[in-house]
Amino acid sequence: MIIDCHGHFTTTPPQVAKFRAHQIAEFARTGKATTDAPPAVSDEEIRSGIDGNQLRIMRERGIDLTIFSPRAVGMDHHQGNEQTNIVWARYCNELVHRACQMFPDSFVGVCQLPQAAGVKPGKAIFEELDRCINEYGFIGANLNPDPTGGKWSDPPLWDKDWWYPLYEKMVALDIPAMIHVSGSCNPHFDAVATHYINGDTTAFVQFMTSDIFKDFPTLKFIIPHGGGAVPYHWGRYRGRALDMGLGRIEDKVMNNVFFDTCVYHQPGIDLLLKVVPTKNILFASETVGAVQGIDPLTGNYFDDTKRYIDASSSADQQQKSQIFSTNALGVYPRLKAHPTCKACL
Amino acid sequence: MIIDCHGHFTTTPPQVAKFRAHQIAEFARTGKATTDAPPAVSDEEIRSGIDGNQLRIMRERGIDLTIFSPRAVGMDHHQGNEQTNIVWARYCNELVHRACQMFPDSFVGVCQLPQAAGVKPGKAIFEELDRCINEYGFIGANLNPDPTGGKWSDPPLWDKDWWYPLYEKMVALDIPAMIHVSGSCNPHFDAVATHYINGDTTAFVQFMTSDIFKDFPTLKFIIPHGGGAVPYHWGRYRGRALDMGLGRIEDKVMNNVFFDTCVYHQPGIDLLLKVVPTKNILFASETVGAVQGIDPLTGNYFDDTKRYIDASSSADQQQKSQIFSTNALGVYPRLKAHPTCKACL
């Protein structure tokens, strides 16, 4: 079985993004959240968005199940306020839920959180988590480590007052979170090319230099995009941790942190599979997502990451099987209850 | 011949850092630059700082020449104001100059710029460049793409009004710059583990998405630390550039941008040498610097990057020779006049 742990509903119909633009424009104009309700989306619109895109690609590449969440760059936590972002998160999560219900064998949901710049995670986030996990059957959440959109001006992940209540909630619900920044309002950072990768690297070092996993030994995070810069600089991070008296990163971080395989060329995947312990790698492609074209050097899609893993000599079949499915079942405890997974257990 | 393009004078005597602390404390206290002069440093202090450290390691590892600049994390552009930073840059550059004079066969200078948060590069920087290049015989500069120290709140590198006058000056002096952030005052970013690597990746994408090299076809930048996350995500960057209609990054960026080899493990160096064109790679170790310990897995120093290159099968002897010296002579035109290089040409 092959589980892609990182897919987004990037193919919603145009009224969805248009509603968000309306929310933001109204907030900019009035300083308040609009009371306008989000527009309807028909079953047919959801079906055709998924069927000709994510699902077609999954069939072509032999992927059985995608862990599916709202469009990451659309989470947009740095815009609007908490009230707009609650409405927006509920709307986006409901669309993912409907897609999962429509294609229950192929998708399982992960939710967007109603984070907002300057707002400490609290009631709104916990309620949306309860709704998505308990009512929708979602199995995790995307956590934005920088809801200020490239300003990085809210507290870091190790801030106990700011973040620990959310970690307690994650532990209580028995869910992991994928660390995933959203758009950038800082002209220094292109969202997809810069901010995503920097966000991944930043989160890793915050985990490495803090006591989060001493305080929450069962808490789990997935760092996407192959762990940002970390595997390429594995020596720097191993060495820096030793120099700083933090011990081995394998002990300090790697019982709780997992990297996905969204690395879009063969040598990158080879390195990832070679240096990072197999138990810490989860298959993913982020399709349809960041890079949509064909690599002129290979004739294959850049984001066809399964192909790189199949071709890699950095792992054997047993290890690849862990990466393709077994590891995900360990990281997302609620995944075991999913029909597609149950059939394989 | 082996040229290390990335070394810092990290081993100055204690009064040097103490003076900077005094500058900052006085600025914090009074809001003005102190008029106190920097303390004297004896020849013996310079000699013993270098001889037992950088020079000893160069000898042990067979490195002939180091392109030497002031301590990067000490540049500290986000602290003080332009006036404090002029005094500080002049002082640090003079110490590097004296080290280069003392060991002329082994070191050649690159200068720290008197950048300051919120201050557009202008007269102070140009004067210091003239002094260091024309009087001291330095061959390049370190350019901090974020003098706000992790706030990233000054303009990006493609901002014509802010940065182009400096690029004109670089072209006029026929020097390249190494992109190098300094310390971080943002609690999200550990300077060495996060900010350095993010700064490298950020600069690359700013180059990729802008017309800087259309406007300055001969301008050259070295991105240190193996190019940040870029080589590991080479497929993402190649693919993203194509998706964005920017063409091939090899054409758009790689006639002007060079990566050093400060990657502290074998698989990282193997990947760098495999995916990045050989002409774009310059040997470096950043010794004595970011990671100073021994890798328990190999028994060798993490930062002994020559060892990884020697052992790599990703490049042949001819390519390694380019990486070890020939490329540096092309990127730093003024290097050809250095006695150690002249003897080899």
Image (cartoon, coloured by chain):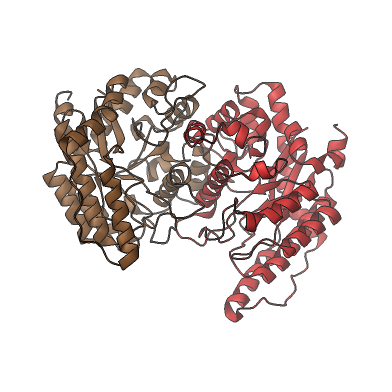
Chain colours: A red, B brown
Residue at 66% x, 53% y is A143
Residue at 80% x, 43% y is A106
Figure check: B73 above or below A144: above
What is the tally of numbered marks visible in this picture? Answer: 0
Res B235 seen here = yes
* Horizontal side, residue B138 vs residue A76: left or right: left
* Horizontal side, residue B93 vs residue A221: left or right: left
Q: Which quarter of the rendering shows the N terminus of chain A? A: top right
Q: Horizontal and vertical percent for residue B122?
A: 23, 61
Name the residue nearer the viewer: A252 or B108. Answer: A252
Name the residue nearer the viewer: A58 or A119. Answer: A119
Res B216 seen here = no
- Looking at the rendering, which quadrant does residue A344 occupy? top right
Q: Horizontal and vertical percent for residue B134?
A: 12, 46
Q: Horizontal and vertical percent for residue A112?
A: 70, 56
In this view, which residue lies farthest toward the left?
B135
Q: Which quarter of the rendering shows the C terminus of chain A? A: top right
* Horizontal side, residue B172 vs residue A195: left or right: left
Figure check: B260 above or below B142: above
* Horizontal side, residue B27 vs residue A164: left or right: left
Name the residue nearer the viewer: A67 or B86. Answer: B86
Name the residue nearer the viewer: B151 or A109. Answer: B151
Q: Horizontal and vertical percent for residue B39?
A: 20, 48
